């Protein structure tokens, strides 16, 4: 049984709906990074990157560690796993729909 609440799922999916935040998650998949390291490839200010990190943190997708003035972040797997589990509940439905569409398109092509 998948253990999640509607609010936590909403926060996770909402956080991941932004392309910048998805890019940050991809960057953190390689391991722990400081805010400066995270911000380096983005053409935006540090406060803007920090806002994105706060959204990810509120969703539980990242964890912040503070060492003096340096804030580092790493990924937290559980919210992502819950989202994947939830989406997988609908996999059979969508695969069936895609199979039906493929069958229909193949039949239409044969009619031509």
Image (cartoon, rainbow, N blue to C red):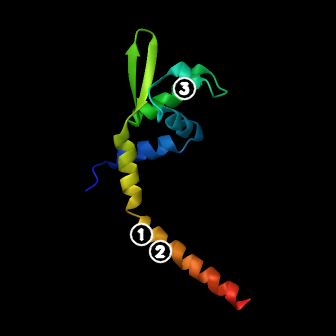
Q: Is residue 57 above or below residue 71?
A: below
Distance CA(mark 3)–CA(mark 1): 37 Å
Looking at the image, tell me whether mark 3 or mark 2 is earlier in sequence order. 3
Instruction: State the residue position of label 1.
Output: 92
Distance CA(mark 3)–CA(mark 2): 40 Å
Q: Quadrant of the N terminus?
A: bottom left
Q: Secondary structure at mark 1?
A: helix
Q: How many marks?
A: 3
14 relative to 86 in the view: left or right: right
Q: Secondary structure at mark 3?
A: helix
Instruction: State the residue position of label 3.
Output: 38
Q: Position of residue 25 (x, y in %)?
A: 49, 36
Residues 41 and 12: in front is 41
Query: Residue drawn at (44%, 21%), measured in percent from left and top?
Result: 72
Residue 96 is labelled as 2
Q: Position of residue 65 (x, y in %)?
A: 38, 20
Q: Quadrant of the C terminus?
A: bottom right
11 relative to 97 in the view: left or right: left
The furthest residue to the top: 68
Q: Position of residue 38 (x, y in %)?
A: 54, 26
Q: Mark 1 near mark 2, Cβ–Cβ under 8 Å?
A: yes
Query: Residue drawn at (52%, 31%), measured in percent from left and top?
Result: 52
- Write down the quadrant of residue 102 in the picture: bottom right
């Amino acid at each position: 049984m998948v253990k999640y609440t509607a609010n936590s799922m909403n926060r996770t999916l909402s956080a991941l709906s932004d392309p910048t935040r998805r890019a940050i998650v991809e960057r953190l998949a390689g391991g722990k990074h400081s805010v400066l390291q995270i911000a380096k490839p983005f053409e935006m200010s540090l406060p803007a990157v920090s806002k994105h990190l706060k959204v990810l943190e509120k969703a539980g997708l990242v964890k912040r560690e503070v060492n003096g003035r340096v804030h580092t972040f790493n990924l937290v797997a559980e919210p992502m796993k819950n989202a994947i589990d939830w989406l997988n509940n609908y996999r059979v439905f969508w695969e069936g729909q895609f199979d039906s569409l493929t069958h229909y398109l193949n039949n239409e092509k044969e009619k031509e």
